[in-house]
Amino acid sequence: MIKNPKIAVFGGGSWATAIVKMLCENLNEVGWYMRNENAIDYIKINEHNPNYLSSAEFDVSKLLLSNDINELVNYADVLIFAIPSAFLKGELDKISENISEKIIFSAIKGIVPESGLIVGEHFHKMYQVPIENIGVITGPCHAEEVAMERLSYLTIACQDRKKARMLSKYISSDYIKTKTSDDIIGTEYAAMLKNIYAIAAGIAHGLGYGDNFQSVIMSNSIREMKRFIKKVHKMKRNINNSAYLGDLLVTGYSVFSRNRMFGNMIGKGYTVKSAMMEMSMVAEGYYAAKSAYLLNEKNGAKTPIIDAVYAVLYQHKNPKQIFKKLTEELD
Amino acid sequence: MIKNPKIAVFGGGSWATAIVKMLCENLNEVGWYMRNENAIDYIKINEHNPNYLSSAEFDVSKLLLSNDINELVNYADVLIFAIPSAFLKGELDKISENISEKIIFSAIKGIVPESGLIVGEHFHKMYQVPIENIGVITGPCHAEEVAMERLSYLTIACQDRKKARMLSKYISSDYIKTKTSDDIIGTEYAAMLKNIYAIAAGIAHGLGYGDNFQSVIMSNSIREMKRFIKKVHKMKRNINNSAYLGDLLVTGYSVFSRNRMFGNMIGKGYTVKSAMMEMSMVAEGYYAAKSAYLLNEKNGAKTPIIDAVYAVLYQHKNPKQIFKKLTEELD
């Protein structure tokens, strides 16, 4: 591994912006790709992202900003992707460089809709990046709290612990504590599944269930997540660690979560289509529900919550009836 | 066991009121002791408790109300106690009957301050009630949501499963689902410990920590709870079941929790004494923190969160410094 690797972040949203901020605490140069040229110009002058996390200020002399993805792929040894999964393939298609020898970290919580793969697998299968060069950055972490420099704990997972430790070092600061893990598959699935459970919590809330039931949903969700991940990749993991349970809770209990909001609208009677239009963007959990359901059809874990969300989102079943049935399956 | 046992609830607060409401869904007669004679007169006329859960209406023809504790101890085969632990001994001292042959269920989330025992142990050691006649009713459950008939899940624990099933039957209804358990010690400790963790969450909030850290506290709390309970009573239990994790979450995430509010005031700079005076009642977790700390001194589980709360509440340590140190011990 290179001693002082060059690092670039790909994405212009709030999570990408937060990661750039964390890196700037430790590095003198950080590559930052976003497709929006106007935003780049704005950042150079105003020292903050106009659209996301605008309270986070940057020392722009440290930023190597570009809307040419190949320029930054070429520049960096470590590529950190924080592009919503629905747009990832479109961005990756622009890359003409060979990326098979790069170190790739995914900060994306979802599935690549076109391949149905979690992001790490997508890079491995589609771009021949070796598994030991692929990592995951996971929460529990609202980007907004990074902007406010509120203490947050991240987990950096890579099968090659040295690479996890390397990135941990660049991410850690007064307000960011990190933990390393070698459970790249489990942490990435957890990050994806939690969005489905946040949709379920939202649907329940929209249907009028209260806080007592919310805690029952969360308690059942973490047990379901454990069963699901165990079927995908069996290894010793403590599902109550922050990267799994903490990440589930910060999303499932957040009234700002897009996934929870999306579920809430559906619980209140919006159709899936109108909820999506109303939100003007797609909640990650929408794609995740389909992929998780289909994957688990083969694996056969008991997943009543994922099944219920799938039935509502993709089989157009009545949320009230489906959740009434779900309540019989939880405990 | 008697076929149609007579049941009485002891306590006039919101949780006692909620339990009486649940029982009235299934029984034609429910004994209800409260010491406040005016409240009894009020209920008989107005069909709801004037002070707690006043939206819950009762068919008063079903209620055998009395402020004579011995009258109802004498009446009932099954005694359900829902008196705040700080007042329990004072009430029990009034009992002149022998209760060693009664079936006792505790719906109290705490420790008896005078004996330092959890409620089940207190009845066993002080009143010679056999362990198999002692049970626990536990959440996750805000009483307020029972009044609103919002779906809630309770766990009824008793080493004698038949007795747990008996009470489950009388408690269950359209809006109450129950699960039985034989982990009377674990569920009771969980119900007690969660209040300490809610105080910790409150202190953190008061000190300005955000939602990311809150999820880290909760994720660490459930792991700590597991270690603590394992030392007290080792048996096979899934700590992520609703009676443990669900109960922790419904309290730890509740802005209405007295324990969380008490912690919050301390985080904001109130002294312990002034926070107590301001709240005009003592949060259960205050006593629980001391008992849990002292018990665990002997048991030796790693409990950084309990230790931090104890240091703040009883050793008058500075919350800011103690929590700064705590953040180093969590992950």
Image (cartoon, coloured by chain):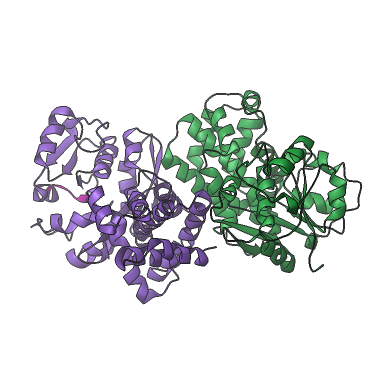
Chain colours: A purple, B green
The residue depicted at 59 percent of the width and 48 percent of the height is B147
Callout count: 0
Relative horizontal placement of residue A269, taking residue A127 as reference (left or right):
right
**Quarter location, residue A59:** top left
**Quarter location, residue A148:** top left
Choose between A88 and A70: the one closer to the eye. A88
Q: Is residue A75 visible?
A: yes
Choose between B73 and B105: the one closer to the eye. B73
Q: Is residue B231 visible?
A: no
Indicate the position of residue A43 as horizontal and vertical percent values: 16, 33
Relative horizontal placement of residue A136, taking residue A67 as reference (left or right):
right
Relative horizontal placement of residue A12, taking residue A217 as reference (left or right):
left
Q: From the viewer's perspective, is residue B91 above or below residue B100?
A: above
Is A79 magenta? The answer is yes
The residue depicted at 86 percent of the width and 41 percent of the height is B93
Indicate the position of residue B329 as horizontal and vertical percent values: 51, 42
Is A302 magenta? The answer is no
Q: Which residues are magenta?
A: A75-82
**Quarter location, residue A90:** bottom left
Q: Quadrant of the N terminus of chain B?
A: bottom right
Indicate the position of residue A210 as horizontal and vertical percent values: 49, 50
Q: From the viewer's perspective, is residue B120 above or below residue B327?
A: below
Indicate the position of residue A113 as horizontal and vertical percent values: 23, 63
Relative horizontal placement of residue B207, taking residue A109 as reference (left or right):
right
